[in-house]
Image (cartoon, rainbow, N blue to C red):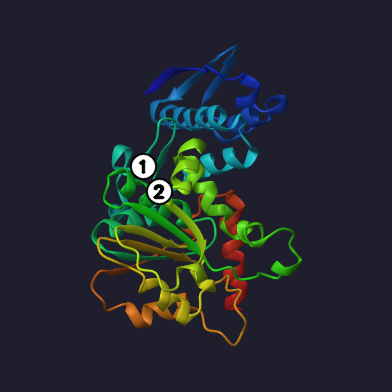
Amino acid sequence: MITEKTIEIQGIEPVILFGPYDSLLKKIRNEFSDIQITARGTQIILRGKSDEVALLERIFSEMILLANKHGEVLDNDLNTLINLALSPAPGPRGAHHGDEDIIVTSSDYTVRAKTDGQRRMVAEARTNDIVFAIGPAGTGKTYTAVAIAVAAWKAKRVKRIVLARPAVEAGESLGFLPGDLAQKIDPYLRPLYDALQDMLTAEKLKLLTEQRVIEIVPLAYMRGRTMNSSFIILDEAQNASNKQMKMCLTRLGLNSKAIITGDVTQIDLPKDIDSGLTNSPAILNDIKGISFVYLDKSDVVRHKLVRDIINAYEIHEQK
C-alpha cells in the first residue's frame, strides 16, 4: 500500500538535519531508494510503501531528537540509526517493541533497549540482584546498565547509584597525565558521565553528585564499604582481578543490585594476573540471583563498521 507522510521540522535549521551539501539526506536516499523523499523548507514529505515510510519516519524522528539535544547530527549517528532500522527483527525472546522497550525517560530523552541482548539485560535485572553483561565493544552494555540504574533510582527502588571502573592503564601511564588524582582518573570514568548526561540534566547530575546520591569512583575506592539500597555498576570489569571482583561483589548490601559489564577480548591486565570477569561464570554460575547475559556482534549499535571489525578479529583469532 502506497502512503504519504509529512514531517514538520521545528526548532532546528534544516541544514543540521540534512547535513552539509545535503550529505545526510543523500545517504538516506541511497539507502531507501524505493521511497520518494521531498525536502521542502521545513517539511519532509515521504511517499512509498507504508511499512518503509513508517521506518524512515522513525529515523527522521530520532535525527530531530539528536539535533535538538546536541545541535548536530553526525554521519556516524545516521549510520547507527540506519543500521538499527535495517537490522533483522529479533526472535521471539526479544520480540518486544514500542513502550515495552523503554528503560528510562527524562523530559527530553527516552532510552530504549534497541537489541535482543539489551532486552535480556533489562529482563534479567528485574529478577536478579546481580547481572553480568559480557560482550564486545559497541553493544551498549554500559549505556543500558546506567539506564537501568537511573530507572531504579527514579522509581525509588534504590537510594543511590554507584558506578565504578578499574583504573587499569591500557598502554598509557597515569603518571604522565597532567593534574591531580581526580583529573588523572577522569578519562577512565568519562564514559559513565557521558551516559548519565543523556539521562539527567546537567544541573540535576551536578546536584546528585554533590549529594553523593550518584558516585562515580575507581574500583579501589570501594574497598571496606557496604552499599545498602544502592545500584552498583562495575564497568570494564575484564580489567578487575579475581580479588577485586570478589571485593566488588561483596560490597552488596540490603536492597541493592549490581550490573557487571565487560569485554573479555579487551583485557589490559598484566599477563600474570587473571581477569575476574573471565573466571566469574565458572565460580558463580550456579548461584541463584546471579545471571549472565552474553551480547554479541548482532547487538552492536555503533557505526556499522564496528560489527565488521569484531567479525574480522574473530576470524583472525580462530586462525
Residue closest to the far bottom: 272
Q: CA distance from mark 1 to mark 2?
A: 6 Å
Q: Answer with mark 1 or mark 2, whichever residue precedes in sequence.
A: 1
Q: Is residue 173 visible?
A: no
Residue 19 in percent (x, y) is at 66, 28
Horizontal arrangement in the rendering, residue 107 relative to residue 301 (left or right)? left
* Dot 1 amino acid type: Val
Across the whole image, how many numbered discs are drawn on residues?
Answer: 2
Residue closest to the far top: 41
- Which residue is at 39% across, 61% downward? 232
Residue 126 in percent (x, y) is at 26, 56
Q: Which residue is mark 2?
A: 147
**Viewport quadrant of the C terminus:** bottom right
Residue 290 in percent (x, y) is at 29, 70
Residue 142 in percent (x, y) is at 47, 56
* Dot 2 amino acid type: Ala
Of residues 136 and 202, the one nearer the viewer is: 202
In terms of image quadrants, where is residue 288? Answer: bottom left
Q: Does residue 191 sit above or below 103 in this rendering? A: below
Q: Is residue 205 visible?
A: yes
Label 2 near label 1: C-beta < 8 Å? yes
Of residues 136 and 174, the one nearer the viewer is: 174
Q: Which mark is residue 104?
A: 1
